[in-house]
Structure formats: C-alpha cells, structure tokens
Image: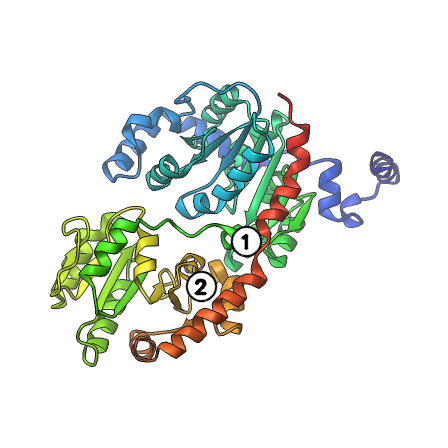
Amino acid sequence: MNAATVRAYELAGADIKRATPLDHLAAISPPPPNAYLKIYATALSLLRPGVPLLLNRRERQGKEDAARRGERLGFAGRRRPVGKLIWVHAASVGETIAVLPLIDELLQADTSAHVLLTTGTTTSATLAARRLPERAFHQFVPLDVPQYCARFLDHWRPDLSIFTESDIWPNLVLAIAERAIPLALINARMSPRSMRRWRKNARIGRPLFSRFNVVLAQNSGVARTIKQLGAPNVIIAGNLKIDAPPPPVDPAALTALEAATEDRPILLAASTHPGEESLVATAHAEIAKSIPALLTIIVPRHPDRGQALAAEMAGRGLATERRSQTPLPSRNAQVYIADTIGELGTFYALSSVALIGGSLVEHGGQNPIEAIRHGAVVLTGPHKHNFHEIYDELLAAKGATEVKSADELAAVVKRLLSDPSEAAKLRTGAEAALGRLGGALAKTVAALKPFLTNAGP
C-alpha cells in the first residue's frame, strides 16, 4: 500500500510530503543525507590530522584516558564476545546511571547476550568499571569521524544499537543505518531551545531521526518534535531516571561522616556549576548568623574544580576543607568541598536538605530523583528545564521548593532546619510525585523486545 501510494503521487505529479505525515513518509523511504551532512562528514575526515592535538589537550585537562586513546579512534580495546551483542551508548554519568537497570533487564532477557556500553567521559568510564554487571563491558565511543565510526562498527558488529537521551552523532547514526543494524533512541529528551533548533534545522534532523527504528521519548513535547523530524515509530515512555536506583552509599564512609558531623545541621549543594557556589556561600553566611553550627557541603559537578572552589570559599572568610585532602570535616569547618568521584549517594544519605545544582545558573538543572530516594528534601533554582516534567510534578505535589536567590535559599534552609514537620511534608509529597511518574523502564524494555527477538546470533 505504501509503495502504491508513493507511485500514485509520482504519476500525478503531486508532492506526497504535503499529504503524508513525515513519520509515515520516513517509514516508506528515509530521506538521504543532505548537503549539510555530507559537508560535515567530509570536513571531519579532512580534519583527522588534527585529532591527536585535540586529544593531547583533553588528556592534559583530564578529560581523556591516554591509555585508551585508541578507542576514541575506533580501535577496539578487547575482542568481540561470541554471540548476540547489544550496544548501548550513554553520554556521561547521569545517562549511564539511567541505563544501568535497562542493561540488567537486557541481560536477564537473554542469558547468552553481552552488552557493550560506550560513553564519552572519564568519569562515566570509572562509574562503568564499578557498576556494570557480568557480561557487560565499557568502551569509549569513537569520535564522529566516518573512518573511526566504520572501524568501530566493523569490529563490534552489534545486533542492536541503543542511543540515550540527546547524544546523537550524525556520522555514527548514518553508518549504523547503512549496515542495517536496528537503531533505537531511548529516554529521548530535548530542551525547549533544542526543540526550536531542531525544527529550524529540520533538513539536517530528518535524515537522522528517520533512521531510528524506535524512539522512546520522555514526554509528549519531545515525542511531537521527533515525529515532526521524521522518526517513524515514537512512543512516550517517561523518564528512565525515575526508575533508576539511587547512587550507592558507602556504609563505612557514611558512618564516619555521621560521627564527624554529629549534631551539626547540614546543607548539601549537589552537582553545582560555576557561579552557583558563590550564591551558596552567601546563603551559608546568612544562615550561620542564626545557626552557627551549620556545615555546608558542596559537591561540584566536576570534581577537578575542588582546589579552585576551596580557594574561593577561603577568600570569603569561610573555613574550608576538601574531601580529597581531609577525609573527614573537622568541627571547625564551615564549608566542605566533596571533590571526589562516586560519593554523591553517601552525601545525600548524610544530608537532610539538598540544593540540586545547575539550577541557580542557566544550565538547566540536574536530576533531583537521587536526592529524594535517599531522603533529602529537594531545593531547586529557577533554571530546571532539563528536568522540567519531574519538577512540575514535584512542585505541584509540594515535594520540592524553588528558590531564586541566595537570600531565598537562606530563608528556606533556616525554616526547614528549624521545622522538621515541614521537611517531612516535602518528603511525603516528593515520594507521591515519583510514584505517579514511574514506569519508563518497563515500557522501554517492551518496546525493545521485538528487536532483541529478531537479532541474529
């Protein structure tokens, strides 16, 4: 029927695009890569001689693993396992945490399958090394150079490729489609700004999104945009991060921290970005006027900022210590910089009130679910569009509080630390909101099952 319809429009000299939704049209015949994508591929191919210089600089900045540089060039770091191989790509730490339960489900569904997880950051590689289950392993994703992508795919030959959220690399997507490897986009998200940008550049988006066999979107707005970009099979599944387990807690570390901070009220500023810590410091100074025993713990999104942050806090006259230098905060510490990796769950479990970073500056916010799962009361700034659906539900259920300035942050924290009943109400509202938002994992597994069943050995 589809082929006959296309032929009928051709014979009539009519434009099928004016009468057929783009997602149906893409299922019939995905548009070929346009001139922009061809120029992009050619440019990256020509720029290959400069890649070592780029990687050298990133290695000096701690953003690349020099010992595994070959993986960024498409060279495999190990042999391909025999049998079915499912490839899951996640950009960084947050996306990796979200897909870990999915990886468990995929491996349980087929006890002979293996999972290849790729990411692009050293912090996510460290996390993967600690938390990937048996029959799953990590590699760095190749840079989006056609030759590197081909080398990667020729070695691994995945039976199913799964991309996560919004980390879509054009040359890699097109290379996967050329090999007829089933391709899925899960937990798909776009900020309002990204939606506008994709719609404006639909000539680039359609050849890419039309090549995904299935897209699992976080919400209806994202689903609508991706369908307009030609994806032929879009499902609203919700956010996998809601179903993800909370970050792990180190019991020994938690016990030691509890002893060191006994009887001290704690404000946690989690996953902070540049510009936020100064606001937190101002709030701390105001709160300490009435709660002098307050300890503010700052967990920067990028731990390598620890030294600079400590200097900034000390410059404000605050007694500051760093986790990487001082394993436990002293009784004199006013600010404690947790500049280590993999301990956020422990600090959430330690703290009663948590400001979720990336929201007091125009970053778009970070995931509040992890804090709630560990019993912390959630505060957020006004810039939270990366998780707007979750925050909308939390705020409607009175399960989180929004603050717009250092003064508001100080006032809310003083109130919560002084009134345990108000904090308890916020925790109850947050748990109720999460109960209504869950279910994305089951929907995602159900949508992927046909591709897993059809995958060859």
Q: CA distance from mark 1 to mark 2?
A: 15 Å
Q: In the rendered structure, which amino acid carries the disc numbered 1? A: Asn
* Label placed on residue 78: none
Please give left or right for residue 188 compared with residue 315 in the image.
right
Mark 1 vs mark 2: which is more N-terminal? 1
Q: Quadrant of residue 8?
A: top right
Residues marked 1 and 2 touching at CB (< 8 Å): no
Q: In the rendered structure, which amino acid carries the disc numbered 2? A: Lys
In the image shown, does 201 or 230 lie closer to the viewer?
230
Q: Picture coordinates of residue 113 (x, y %)?
A: 55, 27
**Badge 1: residue crowd in 10 Å (few <14, some 14–19, many ≥20):** many
* Label placed on residue 384: 2
Q: Picture coordinates of residue 201 (x, y %)?
A: 57, 48
Q: In what quadrant of the picture does the C terminus appear?
A: top right
Q: In what quadrant of the picture does the N terminus appear?
A: top right
**Badge 2: residue crowd in 10 Å (few <14, some 14–19, many ≥20):** many
In the image shown, does 291 or 147 lie closer to the viewer?
291
In the image shown, does 19 or 272 lie closer to the viewer?
272
At x 48%, y 27%, the residue is 149
